[in-house]
Image: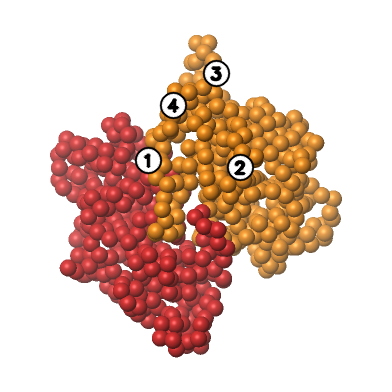
Amino acid sequence: MTALLQVRDLRMHFPLGGIGALLSQLRGEPERVVRAVDSVSFDVRQGETLALVGESGCGKSTVARCLLRLLNPSGGSMRFGDIEIAKLDAKAVQHLRRDIQMVFQDPTASLNPRLRVSSMVEEPLMLHTDLGPAERKQRALEVLEEVGLGADLAERYPHELSGGQRQRANIARAVATNPRFVVLDEPTSALDVSLRSRAILLLEALREKHGMSYLFISHDLATVKYLASRVAVMYLGVIVETGATHEIFAKPLHPYTRALMAAVPVPDPDAKRDSFVLSGEIPSPIERHTGCRLRGRCPLAKPICAEPVPLREVAPGRQVACHMI
Amino acid sequence: MTNLLDVADLTVHFQSDAGAIEAVDHINFSIRRGEVVGLVGESGSGKSVTSFAILRLIRRPGEIKSGSVRFDGVDLATLSEEQMRRIRGAKIAMISQSPRTALNPVIPVGKQISRLFRLHEGLSARVAEKRMLDMLDLVRIPDPRRRAGQYAHQLSGGMCQRIMIAMALATSPRLLIADEPTTGLDVSIAARILDLLRELGAKTGAAIMLITHDLGVVAEICDRVVVMHAGQVVEAAPVRSIFHAPAHPYTRALVGSIPRVDRDVAMTPIPGSVPSLLNPPPGCRYVSRCDHATDQCRVARPPLESRGQDHDVACYYDIGRQTGGVAA
């Protein structure tokens, strides 16, 4: 089966500005860039959820922003069906957003404080569909009902809603146009414990009902385990491991994945924990990295780790970028 | 030996135009010396208000309506504002959820710590600086001398939280209140902060009151857990009992509602939401969300009663279960 979304060699480099950059330009030195995303490839199939997992600064949100063309990538390709997202002009990008939508992390900041919830859900319908005003209104109420916001809540302003209700409004807005693909950028991390599980179940129910695909961006591994069928782990701008969710959780192979799993607090006081830890802090994404990017922190590192380390298939559907595996 | 902290019958109300919001309602709990106690519950359960009440930091329109807070044998309500100031920061320290905003943005972080030594212990600038560098070393800030000269905005979130911990522990407090200390931090950084808290707590003998809604964090470092719901304590027990034999329906629902990395079990959200604390009805505040509620629960609030070793529960249904009086 061909993938709905095929990302190949995606790169997003941000040039450094300021006096330092100017000076090095005058000295004729090569331009300094932040390599936020540095050659990332993955597929998302029809109807599946791929989780993009990693810590702050690993580039996972940048990948999302490239997919929606909120950023213009420095290189690589992103094929969505038979459309090449990277090459679309501004008008075609607008058109694309009927099919690719996004739910942002901060449920409050991503709602317009001056619009009623129902009007906000109507906006994408106005932009992307031919529906008349009455039909739009009806569709907005329908989708709000679907996420659990009844008619009385639909006519409220964002400040009159709780955090969980706001995130539902965001989800309703994202799915209003029946998109085929939704990018979820940490949709549950701002939610309280009891609301988190409800949001997870809602997202899963919506996906099943409408056959959407999700790219789920998160550092909350417990949530990932419930929502995703496959996982891609990012570290410092590259993917270090991909595989089926249950396999990665059962046996993480890449040392970074292993350390990430070992760090998750387990809600069981008697749980036996993997004591695998990395030393030091995440290095700067400005430096040009050759070889494995983790080698400075990895307890398993050997001299060979200075050699380039591409993702390679170690089992069907399982890829790891590590010389030691 | 007496408990380090005894909170008895504490009630905090906030006056609003519509009436009194009963944020904390007649709660009782204790913290022993050197113990790590988790205060858990959903948003709006009164966890943070409780910590402010302990520090006597409730300001209008809030008001402590009843109850006492005994710290180290002293009723804090009897102290003058000046005496209380000497307790805050020195005997009871606090670290908050957003370390970057809790730090002063225009003073180098090292100076914020050395200042404490000068203020609380009257040390000279030189000695204070040396103690400050030792402190940064203790919380494992790499290259302490350089970091001490930097400002909060130049440090990462995890680094800022370490600075906060260094500040909190600088005065050798007996009680450290940590309000969601790892929320917003990456998992590996959070894990290190928790390790650090546990280790330094053991080393300095400080008790820790950890406010959180993350049960993973609770299981990780707490000895005992106090579960709050809608301003009331519904259960208090050793950490193992909370996870393996939760007694109150709310505790059970809370434990069953979280996504688990460690096992494949279904996740059931807690029904309903925290009830309004504006003129709440008498009786149990969990009644509208509880599968086992009876008329008794609606009429009178179940008292917090002992269920054996160190385990207190406020629930009629659970009493019935214990004595066989109610069919499950």
Residue nearer the viewer, A325 or B286: A325
Q: Residue furthest front?
A: A315
Helix, strand, or loop for circle 2?
strand
Q: Which mark is residue A243?
A: 2
Circle 2 chain:
A
The quadrant in which residue B140 appears is top left
State the separation of the CA atoms marked 4 and 1: 29 Å
The subunit carrying tag 1 is B
The structure residue drawn at horizontal position 32% and vertical position 43%, both measured from the top left corner, is B163
Q: Nearer the viewer, residue A208 or B304?
A: A208
Q: Position of residue B211 (x, y in %)?
A: 38, 59
- The residue beneath circle 4 is A302
Kind of residue at badge 2? Gly
Looking at the rendered structure, the secondary structure element under dot 1 is helix
Q: Which chain is red?
A: B
Q: What residue did someone put label 1 on? A: B159
User: Is residue B62 in view?
Assistant: no
Identified by mark 1, the residue type is Met
Circle on res. A31? 3
Residue at the image point whose x is 39% and y is 72% from the top: B235
Element type at mark 3: loop
| Quadrant in the rendering for residue A313 | top right
The amino acid on which the numbered mark 3 sits, given as a three-letter code, is Glu
Q: Nearer the viewer, mark 4 or mark 1?
A: 4
Mark 2 vs mark 4, CA separation in Å:
25 Å
Q: Which circle's residue, 3 or 4, is located before the other in the chain?
A: 3
